[in-house]
Amino acid sequence: MNIMNRLERKLYRLRVEPFFRYIIFAMAGVYLLQMLFPPFNLISKLLLVMPMVYLGEVWRLISFLIVPPLYDPFSAMLNMYFYYFIGTSLESKWGARRFLLYFLLGALGAVLAALITQVGTNHFLYMSMFFAFSLLHPEQELLLFFVLPVKMKWLALFNAVYYIYMFIVGDWPQRVAMIFSLLNLFLFFGGDMLTMIRDSINHWQRKRRFQNAQRR
Protein backbone atom coordinates (compact mmCIF):
# COMPACT_ATOMS: atom_id res chain seq x y z
CA MET A 1 0.00 0.00 0.00
CA ASN A 2 2.95 2.33 0.57
CA ILE A 3 3.85 1.91 -3.11
CA MET A 4 0.28 2.78 -4.07
CA ASN A 5 0.35 5.86 -1.86
CA ARG A 6 3.59 7.05 -3.45
CA LEU A 7 2.21 6.51 -6.94
CA GLU A 8 -0.98 8.35 -6.02
CA ARG A 9 1.00 11.31 -4.67
CA LYS A 10 2.74 11.63 -8.03
CA LEU A 11 -0.68 12.20 -9.61
CA TYR A 12 -1.23 15.28 -7.44
CA ARG A 13 0.81 17.20 -10.00
CA LEU A 14 -1.97 16.53 -12.50
CA ARG A 15 -5.51 17.84 -12.53
CA VAL A 16 -7.58 14.65 -12.63
CA GLU A 17 -11.33 14.95 -13.08
CA PRO A 18 -13.88 12.13 -12.77
CA PHE A 19 -13.65 10.29 -16.08
CA PHE A 20 -15.21 6.86 -15.83
CA ARG A 21 -18.68 7.86 -16.98
CA TYR A 22 -17.17 8.92 -20.32
CA ILE A 23 -15.68 5.46 -20.78
CA ILE A 24 -19.11 3.89 -20.30
CA PHE A 25 -20.74 6.44 -22.62
CA ALA A 26 -18.13 5.60 -25.26
CA MET A 27 -18.73 1.90 -24.70
CA ALA A 28 -22.47 2.37 -25.18
CA GLY A 29 -21.77 4.40 -28.33
CA VAL A 30 -19.62 1.62 -29.75
CA TYR A 31 -22.37 -0.92 -29.05
CA LEU A 32 -24.97 1.30 -30.75
CA LEU A 33 -22.78 1.91 -33.82
CA GLN A 34 -22.10 -1.82 -34.11
CA MET A 35 -25.86 -2.46 -34.10
CA LEU A 36 -26.61 0.30 -36.64
CA PHE A 37 -23.70 -0.41 -39.00
CA PRO A 38 -22.77 -4.10 -38.63
CA PRO A 39 -20.89 -4.33 -41.97
CA PHE A 40 -18.33 -1.82 -40.68
CA ASN A 41 -17.52 -4.26 -37.84
CA LEU A 42 -16.34 -1.49 -35.51
CA ILE A 43 -15.71 -3.71 -32.50
CA SER A 44 -13.20 -5.86 -34.39
CA LYS A 45 -11.21 -2.68 -35.13
CA LEU A 46 -11.01 -1.82 -31.42
CA LEU A 47 -10.06 -5.20 -29.95
CA LEU A 48 -6.59 -5.63 -28.48
CA VAL A 49 -4.97 -7.93 -31.05
CA MET A 50 -1.21 -7.61 -30.79
CA PRO A 51 -0.34 -8.68 -34.38
CA MET A 52 -2.47 -5.75 -35.59
CA VAL A 53 -0.76 -3.42 -33.09
CA TYR A 54 2.61 -4.48 -34.52
CA LEU A 55 1.31 -3.51 -37.97
CA GLY A 56 0.67 0.04 -36.76
CA GLU A 57 -2.83 -0.05 -35.26
CA VAL A 58 -1.55 1.28 -31.94
CA TRP A 59 -4.93 2.72 -30.93
CA ARG A 60 -5.93 -0.81 -29.96
CA LEU A 61 -3.75 -0.46 -26.84
CA ILE A 62 -6.38 1.98 -25.54
CA SER A 63 -9.52 1.35 -27.59
CA PHE A 64 -10.02 -2.14 -26.14
CA LEU A 65 -11.08 -0.43 -22.91
CA ILE A 66 -14.35 0.71 -24.55
CA VAL A 67 -15.22 -2.59 -26.22
CA PRO A 68 -18.73 -3.34 -24.87
CA PRO A 69 -19.93 -6.69 -23.52
CA LEU A 70 -20.99 -8.76 -26.52
CA TYR A 71 -24.46 -9.77 -25.35
CA ASP A 72 -27.99 -9.12 -26.51
CA PRO A 73 -29.02 -5.46 -26.12
CA PHE A 74 -30.83 -5.91 -22.80
CA SER A 75 -28.00 -7.89 -21.18
CA ALA A 76 -25.37 -5.53 -22.58
CA MET A 77 -27.29 -2.54 -21.19
CA LEU A 78 -27.46 -4.16 -17.74
CA ASN A 79 -23.74 -4.94 -17.80
CA MET A 80 -22.79 -1.42 -18.84
CA TYR A 81 -25.07 0.06 -16.19
CA PHE A 82 -23.43 -2.19 -13.59
CA TYR A 83 -19.98 -1.07 -14.76
CA TYR A 84 -21.14 2.54 -14.51
CA PHE A 85 -22.53 2.01 -11.01
CA ILE A 86 -19.46 0.36 -9.49
CA GLY A 87 -16.96 2.54 -11.37
CA THR A 88 -18.51 5.88 -10.45
CA SER A 89 -19.04 4.65 -6.87
CA LEU A 90 -15.35 3.78 -6.51
CA GLU A 91 -14.41 7.07 -8.13
CA SER A 92 -16.58 8.94 -5.64
CA LYS A 93 -15.23 7.05 -2.62
CA TRP A 94 -11.54 7.07 -3.54
CA GLY A 95 -11.35 10.29 -5.51
CA ALA A 96 -10.53 10.59 -9.20
CA ARG A 97 -6.74 10.23 -8.76
CA ARG A 98 -6.79 7.01 -6.77
CA PHE A 99 -9.42 5.48 -9.01
CA LEU A 100 -7.42 6.49 -12.09
CA LEU A 101 -4.39 4.73 -10.62
CA TYR A 102 -6.43 1.58 -9.97
CA PHE A 103 -7.91 1.67 -13.48
CA LEU A 104 -4.56 2.31 -15.20
CA LEU A 105 -2.86 -0.52 -13.31
CA GLY A 106 -5.64 -2.89 -14.38
CA ALA A 107 -5.40 -1.68 -17.99
CA LEU A 108 -1.61 -2.10 -17.92
CA GLY A 109 -2.06 -5.64 -16.62
CA ALA A 110 -4.42 -6.41 -19.50
CA VAL A 111 -1.90 -5.06 -22.02
CA LEU A 112 0.94 -7.08 -20.45
CA ALA A 113 -1.22 -10.19 -20.68
CA ALA A 114 -1.88 -9.42 -24.35
CA LEU A 115 1.88 -9.17 -24.99
CA ILE A 116 2.12 -12.78 -23.82
CA THR A 117 -1.07 -14.23 -25.31
CA GLN A 118 -1.32 -11.87 -28.33
CA VAL A 119 -4.98 -11.09 -27.55
CA GLY A 120 -6.29 -8.84 -24.77
CA THR A 121 -9.63 -8.35 -23.04
CA ASN A 122 -11.12 -5.74 -20.71
CA HIS A 123 -13.40 -8.25 -18.99
CA PHE A 124 -11.16 -9.02 -16.02
CA LEU A 125 -10.29 -5.34 -15.57
CA TYR A 126 -13.95 -4.51 -15.01
CA MET A 127 -14.37 -7.56 -12.82
CA SER A 128 -11.49 -6.30 -10.67
CA MET A 129 -13.56 -3.16 -10.10
CA PHE A 130 -16.49 -5.33 -9.02
CA PHE A 131 -14.31 -7.17 -6.51
CA ALA A 132 -12.92 -3.87 -5.22
CA PHE A 133 -16.43 -2.52 -4.72
CA SER A 134 -17.45 -5.74 -2.94
CA LEU A 135 -14.51 -5.47 -0.55
CA LEU A 136 -15.41 -1.87 0.27
CA HIS A 137 -19.18 -2.45 0.49
CA PRO A 138 -19.66 -6.13 1.43
CA GLU A 139 -23.07 -5.61 3.06
CA GLN A 140 -24.65 -3.58 0.26
CA GLU A 141 -27.52 -5.38 -1.41
CA LEU A 142 -28.40 -5.63 -5.08
CA LEU A 143 -31.63 -6.97 -6.54
CA LEU A 144 -30.68 -10.05 -8.52
CA PHE A 145 -33.04 -10.37 -11.50
CA PHE A 146 -34.75 -7.25 -10.05
CA VAL A 147 -36.34 -9.44 -7.36
CA LEU A 148 -33.90 -11.30 -5.12
CA PRO A 149 -31.83 -9.14 -2.72
CA VAL A 150 -28.25 -10.41 -2.55
CA LYS A 151 -25.34 -8.89 -0.63
CA MET A 152 -22.27 -7.90 -2.57
CA LYS A 153 -20.04 -10.20 -0.52
CA TRP A 154 -22.00 -13.26 -1.64
CA LEU A 155 -21.94 -12.18 -5.29
CA ALA A 156 -18.19 -11.63 -5.00
CA LEU A 157 -17.70 -15.04 -3.38
CA PHE A 158 -19.71 -16.75 -6.12
CA ASN A 159 -17.70 -15.00 -8.84
CA ALA A 160 -14.40 -15.76 -7.07
CA VAL A 161 -15.25 -19.48 -6.94
CA TYR A 162 -16.27 -19.38 -10.60
CA TYR A 163 -13.01 -17.71 -11.64
CA ILE A 164 -10.95 -20.16 -9.61
CA TYR A 165 -12.76 -22.97 -11.46
CA MET A 166 -12.16 -21.27 -14.82
CA PHE A 167 -8.50 -20.79 -13.91
CA ILE A 168 -8.17 -24.52 -13.24
CA VAL A 169 -10.02 -25.79 -16.33
CA GLY A 170 -9.28 -22.89 -18.73
CA ASP A 171 -6.47 -22.57 -21.23
CA TRP A 172 -3.23 -20.74 -20.48
CA PRO A 173 -4.14 -17.46 -22.29
CA GLN A 174 -7.19 -17.18 -20.06
CA ARG A 175 -5.10 -17.83 -16.95
CA VAL A 176 -2.58 -15.17 -17.96
CA ALA A 177 -5.36 -12.64 -18.60
CA MET A 178 -6.89 -13.36 -15.17
CA ILE A 179 -3.61 -12.99 -13.29
CA PHE A 180 -2.39 -9.81 -14.96
CA SER A 181 -5.76 -8.03 -15.11
CA LEU A 182 -6.37 -8.65 -11.39
CA LEU A 183 -2.95 -7.42 -10.25
CA ASN A 184 -4.44 -4.04 -9.34
CA LEU A 185 -6.85 -5.76 -6.97
CA PHE A 186 -4.03 -7.52 -5.13
CA LEU A 187 -1.85 -4.40 -5.08
CA PHE A 188 -4.64 -2.38 -3.49
CA PHE A 189 -6.27 -5.01 -1.28
CA GLY A 190 -3.72 -7.81 -0.87
CA GLY A 191 -2.95 -6.94 2.76
CA ASP A 192 -6.63 -6.58 3.64
CA MET A 193 -7.50 -9.89 1.97
CA LEU A 194 -4.73 -11.73 3.83
CA THR A 195 -5.93 -10.22 7.11
CA MET A 196 -9.51 -11.23 6.31
CA ILE A 197 -8.46 -14.81 5.52
CA ARG A 198 -6.33 -15.02 8.67
CA ASP A 199 -9.18 -13.67 10.84
CA SER A 200 -11.63 -16.14 9.26
CA ILE A 201 -9.28 -19.07 9.95
CA ASN A 202 -8.76 -17.92 13.55
CA HIS A 203 -12.51 -17.53 14.04
CA TRP A 204 -13.12 -21.04 12.67
CA GLN A 205 -10.44 -22.51 14.92
CA ARG A 206 -11.89 -20.79 18.01
CA LYS A 207 -15.34 -22.07 17.09
CA ARG A 208 -14.06 -25.63 16.70
CA ARG A 209 -12.25 -25.49 20.04
CA PHE A 210 -15.42 -24.22 21.73
CA GLN A 211 -17.54 -26.95 20.15
CA ASN A 212 -15.04 -29.65 21.18
CA ALA A 213 -15.02 -28.28 24.72
CA GLN A 214 -18.83 -28.39 24.83
CA ARG A 215 -18.88 -32.06 23.86
CA ARG A 216 -16.61 -33.09 26.73
Image (cartoon, grey):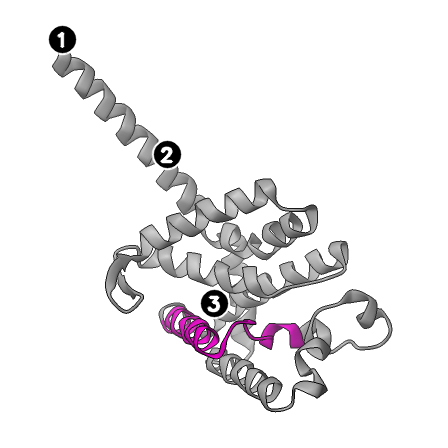
At numbered mark 2, what does the secondary structure look like: helix, strand or loop? helix
Q: Which residue is mark 3?
A: 98
Dividing the picture into quarters, in which one does residue 181 lie? bottom right
Checking the image for residue 216, the label placed there is: 1
Left or right of residue 128: residue 46: right
For residue 126, above or below residue 212: below
Q: Secondary structure at mark 3?
A: helix
Q: Earlier in the sequence, mark 2 or mark 1?
A: 2
Q: State which mark lies toward you, 3 or 1.
A: 1
Residues at marks 3 and 1, CA–CA distance in whole angstroms: 53 Å
For the residues labelled 3 and 2, the Cα–Cα distance comes to 27 Å
Q: Main secondary structure of the magenta part?
A: helix
Picture disc at residue 198: 2
Q: Amino acid at mark 1?
A: Arg
Looking at the picture, tell me which residue is in the foreground, 15 or 173. 173
The residues tagged by marks 2 and 1 sit, at their Cα atoms, a distance apart of: 28 Å
**Does the magenta run of residues contain 72?**
yes
Q: Residue furthest right?
A: 55
Q: Which is more N-terminal, label 2 or label 3? A: 3
Residue 199 colored in magenta in the image: no
Label 1 element class: loop
